[in-house]
Amino acid sequence: MEWALLVQLLVNGLIVGALYGVVAMSFVLIYKASQVVNFAQGEFLLVGAWACWWLITSQQLPFWLAFPVCLAFMTVFGIVLQVVVLRPLIGEPVISVIMATVGLSIFFQALMKWMFGVFAQPFPAIFGADRIELLGLEVKSVYLLSLGLSAVIMLGFWWFFTFSKHGLAMRATAFDQQVAQSLGVSVPRVFAMSWAISAVVSAVAGVVVGVVSGVSSGLSFYGIKVFPAVILGGLDSIVGAMLGGIIVGVLENLAQYVDSQWLNWGNMINIAPFYALILILLIKPYGLFGTKNIERV
Amino acid sequence: MAEPESGTPILAAEHVSLRFGGVRALTDVSFDIRKGEVFSIIGPNGAGKTSMVNCISGRYRPTEGRILFEGQDITRMPPNRRAALGLGRTFQNLALFGHMSVLDNIMVGRHHLLKSGFLRGMAYWLGGAQREELEHRREVEEIIDFLEIQHVRKAQAGTLPYGLRKRVELARAVALRPKLILLDEPMAGMNLEEKEDMARYILDLNREWGMTVLMIEHDMGVVMDISDRVMVLDFGKRIAHGGPAEVLADPHVRRAYLGEEDELVREDAAA
């Protein structure tokens, strides 16, 4: 047993898992508010990361300026996407809406490759110190940033849904649109807001991953990783998504450890979460925290 | 009874018709509600009572006709804007947000009154957000006291017994501070004691809080006791209209409720 490697992988899992959790939360946000399964969630990361990269490298903006400008752009991006593509699809069959988001995913993949090329591009160094010592472990400072940002976003979500007027309106809309409207909540505005928040939060995750390992189309893979996370946590639970993300992150790193030590099958890091996904669907089809649809007659 | 200020209708429906394909839910219904009165719509099952309320609250759009609220044409206005104008409603089948606390349910009703958005909320201590929050809490507490639901304010709405849920739903509609409140069968499924309580709440809302009430109700005793005026619908048509005693004496109403065929309805079937 290599304890150092195990600890290292677990810490990795926690950090990456927190990012999965953040992306999963923004996925669930859209699903809860507007009942759309968004297959283009990964492309939100991609678009956000490329936008930030472009602002820094070709517009020569400093990071502290480029980052908020990028987030402002993503707000508009999310709203435009909802208004132009998804609003006309309200009331259409679920499968049509899903196909539209799959289409969006392919479109943005291709668009980003066309605009920025197919090769991974590194972010310019943002922090003076690349690594810092923490509790005897040497940690990359971007990892600390990533964990910190994830925690801030999670707290932000909690605050938003518990205390803010719009969070309350969003919960009400998720429960019953007709009733929410009768109480003065504008449902179209709630939909647009959920897409905007989701795009912004995903872009933050995208930039963090970009800073750690460069910007490339591989970022959109996070959109796929989100599925085991949200199925694990329950499709309509924000807390579940967060925990699901962390569990998936830790799980894939554990699988990596087991694989590298004993099994030597290779590639367990990518496959293990989906084995877990199948198992969970067999045992708890609504996920750990999801709501069962109980039909009372 | 509260003295209705005659001559100032708070709501006017003008020749409202509603069709779903070949089904006529409402045919040429006109009426007005005066400021300060309790106005009831009664009628047998399927008469179009809830359809009428849905046209007023904006869930349905009338196929023909207009609806005026305080003189303003609201026929094509989305439901949330109507709520902001001062139209509140409850639903026939309970529609509480089951997973939220009673307090949160009521706070959603304050949505259009809460001005502080995201940023001012963040600057909680600097901006007026704190003062605003205190103000809202005071009003919400007043409503909670009035409807006697203090003991369940933190409970999850979905776990409450039926009668209490009806009361919480009323509280949520009242939290909007509507000028006109639409109550769709507020007493359905209640026992006698609960009905008496609810009747008292409705009268207090009307007299002390100054809300005009539009109510759909099946319990004739309650309707006749607390209504200033009553409209009777049958097969989507207005067959009678007036004070409770007047309506009870109307031969069309007797026929509708006793199941006899009425010439007003038959003429429609022949057409």
Image: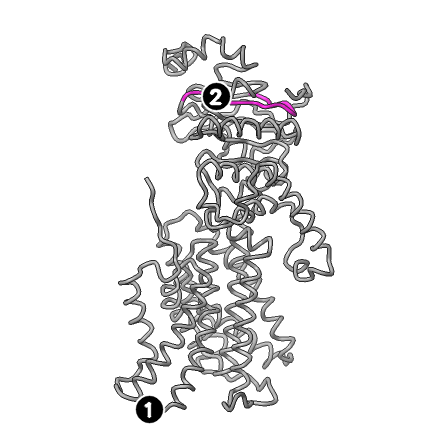
* Picture coordinates of residue A239, whole percent (x, y): 46, 63
> In the shown orientation, is residue A218 left or right of residue B126?
left
- Indicate the quadrant containing the C terminus of chain B: top left, top right, bottom left or bottom right: top left
Q: Secondary structure at mark 1?
A: loop
Q: Which residue is mark 2?
A: B42
Q: Which of label 1 and label 2 is nearer to you? A: 1
Q: Is residue A26 visible?
A: yes
Q: Which mark is residue A185?
A: none
Look at the picture and state if A100 lies above or below B241: below
Q: Secondary structure at mark 2?
A: strand
The Cα atoms of the two marked residues, 1 and 2, are separated by 79 Å
Q: Is residue B78 visible?
A: no
Q: Residue at x 57, y 14 (%)?
A: B243
Residue count near mark 1 (Cα–Cα under 10 Å), binned few <14, some 14–19, many ≥20: few
Which span is picked out in magenta? Answer: B31-44
Q: Residue at x 30, y 89 (%)?
A: A261
Q: Which residue is mark 1?
A: A1
Residue count near mark 2 (Cα–Cα under 10 Å), binned few <14, some 14–19, many ≥20: many
Amino acid at dot 2: Ile
Amino acid at dot 1: Met
* Picture coordinates of residue A59, whole percent (x, y): 62, 78
Q: Nearer the viewer, residue B222 or B196?
A: B196
Look at the picture and state if B18 lies above or below A286: above
Q: Residue at x 31, y 75 (%)?
A: A272
* Picture coordinates of residue B73, whole percent (x, y): 61, 31
Residue A108 figure quarter: bottom left
- Indicate the quadrant containing the N terminus of chain B: top left, top right, bottom left or bottom right: top right
Q: Chain of mark 1?
A: A
Dot 1 and dot 2 within a common chain? no
Q: Chain of mark 2?
A: B
* Picture coordinates of residue A24, whole percent (x, y): 44, 66
Look at the picture and state if B125 lies above or below A126: above
